[in-house]
Amino acid sequence: MEIFANPDTWISLLTLTFMEVVLGIDNIVFISIVVGRLPRDQQAKGRTIGLSMALVFRIILLLFISWIVGASAPLFTINVPFVEADFPVSWRDIILFCGGLFLLAKSTTEIHNKLEGEEEEHAGGGGNATLSKILVQIVLIDIVFSFDSILTAVGLAQEVIIMIIAVIFAMGIMLAFSKYVSDFVNNHPTVKMLALSFLILIGFMLIVESLHQHIPKGYIYFAMFFSVVVEMLNLRLRKKTEPVQLRQSEVLDPEEEEIR
């Protein structure tokens, strides 16, 4: 194909693949958390199906790229009190607003369950978490994240085939590392709490975006990256101090030795 003979095509492909992976981190974190409530023997299946559905959604939306672009067109307007201009509402605004509310509600519920100790009751397959219920939640959030992903793809590439290839590459990378991300998040309670806080932040950002107030994503991702670096340092420090504390606890007090 002539399109692949152009060096700009490969630059666009690499750039778009990288951006899709970055934007897909939110999706991986969400899937890791909700899939963690499934029995261990179903978690890998849940992650694979969840990311596969995300890939299918993105490809389908890319094939209807004209509709996606048109989704930003106003459906109706709302007369806002104390504001002279009317507020236009589009399909994009509705999807982002509902998706933001869903993320806020889901993340808050997960934090509540963790703090109240209800999470342990569901661990190992307990509770009422089923694969079908988890997949429904993944589908809902996939739709929201797919819109953000596709709108980014439209801005970075002109050819639909390039967008589709980049999405496939990005999903392949995320699928390859999804197990490691999921295990790391679910095995470290503080990291999981941090991830849930990120999802609340992203949910709030989606709601703000639906209200036509743009927040540069660079600020959000920098805050997330900085928080992750701090948490990694905390984890490393905890690993160093735990053996010392263990050795100290094994040393008996002199009075206890005399009693023995």
Image (cartoon, rainbow, N blue to C red):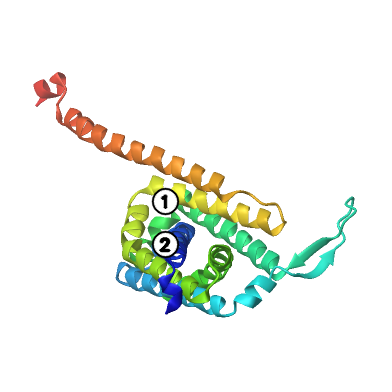
From the viewer's side, name the closer residue of 123 and 206.
Answer: 206
Under tag 1, what secondary structure?
Answer: helix
Asked if marks 2 and 1 touch (Cβ < 8 Å), the reply is no
Q: Is residue 245 left or right of residue 214?
A: left
Query: In terms of depth relative to the viewer, which is nearer, 238 or 61?
Result: 61
User: Which residue position is annotated with label 1?
Assistant: 192
**Residue drawn at the location 45% of the way across and 41% of the way down:** 227
Residue 160 in view, yes or no: yes
Question: Residue 172's spot in the image, x, y percent?
Answer: 36, 69
Measure the alpha-carbon separation of dots 2 and 1. 30 Å
Residue 180 figure quarter: bottom left
- Label 2 neighbour load within 10 Å: few <14, some 14-19, many 20+: some
Which residue is denoted by mark 2 in the rendering?
Answer: 14
Looking at the image, tell me whether mark 2 or mark 1 is earlier in sequence order: 2
In this view, the mark in front (2 or 1): 2
Picture coordinates of residue 129, whole percent (x, y): 44, 69
Image side of residue 52 versus residue 218, left or right: left
Picture coordinates of residue 19 (x, y %)? 47, 59
Residue type at numbered disc 1? Lys
Q: Nearer the viewer, residue 228 or 246?
A: 228
Residue 53 makes an appearance in the image: no
Question: Does 167 appear above or below 28?
Answer: below
Q: Is residue 67 above or below residue 172?
A: below
Q: For the C terminus, which image quadrant?
A: top left
